[in-house]
Image (cartoon, grey):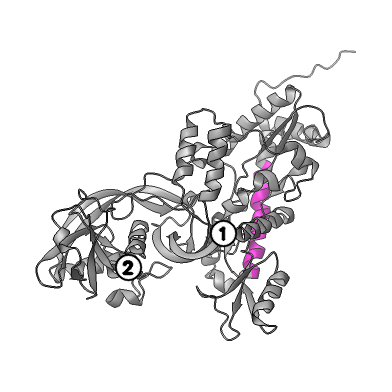
Amino acid sequence: MTATIPTLSSQYDPSITENKWQQVWEARHVFKADPDHPGEPFCVVIPPPNVTGSLHMGHAFESALIDTLVRYQRMLGKNTLWLPGTDHASIGVSTILDKEFRDQGKTRQEVGRETYLERAWQWKAESGGTIVGQLRKLGVSVDWSRERFTMDEGLSDAVILAFTRLYEEGLIYRGNYMVNWCPASQSAVSDLEVEPTEVNGHLWHFRYPLTDGSGYLEVATTRPETMLGDTAVAVNPEDDRYTHLVGKTIDLPIVGREIPVIADAYVDKEFGTGCVKVTPAHDLNDFAMGQRHNLPMITVMNKDGTMNSEAGPFEGQDRFEARQGVVKRLEEDGFLVKIEDYQHTVPYSDRGKVPVEPLLSTQWFVQIKPLADKALDALDNHNSPKFVPERWTKVYRDWLVSLRDWCISRQLWWGHQIPAWYAVSETDGEIRDNTPFFVAANEGEAREKAIAQFGPEVVIEQDPDVLDTWFSSGLWPFSTMGWPDETTKDFQTYYPTSTLVTGFDIIFFLGGADDHDGRSFHRQDAL
């Protein structure tokens, strides 16, 4: 009897091979980690892909690199854990769902928070299932028994604890500051959702008349609509052309507001005419000048990108429609000097696909410097973390030195709702900038704090905003190990983790975007 000799296909077929062996590996728990196993621990937590659709080639490349490292370390006899999982991607999923409801002729507010979140969880199940399936088809040697999601119950508890602890230590605060605002999403956005984009625009030059009738100051801007919120004109204190004008005032065209001429070292004598319009509520650098000189902060724009009542005759117009209207009016009134073609960098919302608006807004922030100082100490004195290639160490260090406080609140519904409750009026329930609030782990604890201050009749309402996705992702390496319970075997064995494989852009988020007036613009959010 002749034996049948199996034949191998002449070509590798991943649809057959990977499915087969993935099932065998999982059934036999081949890659299941055991903290009691002998050998030096080697641990990688996968940078969790966003549940916004499916994996792309970058994810595949990254996973292949990690898989190679993990398999090598495993063959060396180390006690390896590669932990898989996914990220809830607050703004990404929200953008998808908002579009889905718009296509149905509905808004988020009309649908309601409960129904919206039900659909979000459905989306997570669909998209997250697709991503996990793709990872399995790649044949990655992860421990599927430890798969996590950033909004799992345990991980969500870790987020609440981290927020309350940082607040109690004075590292989280609520304040009214300049943020990157996306009019399409109607939310503050982080630098990860901002993409500097080269545009061919214009630089408009206007004359602002001195109140005493002695002449004009010429300013240049790429955002004429913001001049409606100007509260000063600034010159460099060492610029001999203008020092005699400091302390005088100009009459702001269209608006008719009398505003001062101030001296500030920030102004670049060589840029434009050396005179800079100052709009503290609509520009990060102007905001800083406004604070130094105690200038009024006048917001002329609504959160949806339309002009508000402070914009006078342009109220209700879209910001770009108002831009054209302001230029036309200034030309008619004889204040337009010239228009130059001007190529510059404008920050765009990655999700909303519209220019980001620097906007004054009441948000929650993390005080970064004390945290960055700890990271700098670890880097400078302990060479931790160690970068490969080593040249990225300097990039990381420069980033830590340049950080500003991090805006962590997002005006969205999908994500970890901020654990703060406000003592609101029974009549309108409105949350205002000065509304008293109580940070707590849950509503019961918040109510106890509110009753102690205002009595048993107090009405409280939770902050409707959610936390920036990166707040929870920052906890990922240890919340997946059971933190805040540091006695778990996984935490004691596998944390701190050994290696992170990721794109260099994860290190470095600040940089060379310009603001809308052509000056250096360093965005304030950070990982």
Asked if labels 2 and 1 touch by Cβ distance under 8 angstroms, the answer is: no
Residue 255, quarter of the rendered image? bottom left
> Residue at position x 58%, y 86% from top?
427
Q: Quick check: 21 left or right of 314?
A: right
Q: Residue furthest bottom?
A: 427
Q: Quick check: 79 left or right of 335?
A: right
> Residue at position x 31%, y 74% from top?
311
Q: Residue furthest right?
A: 1
| Residue 132 drawn in magenta | yes
**Disc 1 crowd, CA 10 A, few/some/many (<14, 14-19, 20+):** many
* Residue at disc 2, secondary structure: loop
Q: Is residue 161 visible?
A: yes
| Residue 417 drawn in magenta | no
**Disc 2 crowd, CA 10 A, few/some/many (<14, 14-19, 20+):** many
- Residue nearest the viewer, comparing 427 with 329: 427
Q: Main secondary structure of the magenta part?
A: helix
What segment carries the magenta color? 114-133
> Residue at position x 74%, y 22% from top?
75
Q: Is residue 430 above or below residue 8?
A: below
Disc assigned to residue 322? none
Across and down, in percent, residue 62 comes to 58, 34
* Residue at disc 1, secondary structure: strand
Residue kind at label 2, given as amino acid type: Leu
- Report the Cα–Cα distance between label 1 and label 2: 26 Å
Mark 1 vs 2, N-terminal side: 1
- Return the residue at label 2: 295
Q: Quick check: 378 left or right of 225?
A: right
- Residue nearest the viewer, comparing 57 with 426: 426
- Return the residue at label 1: 172
- Which quadrant does the N terminus fall into? top right
Q: Quick check: 305 left or right of 257?
A: right
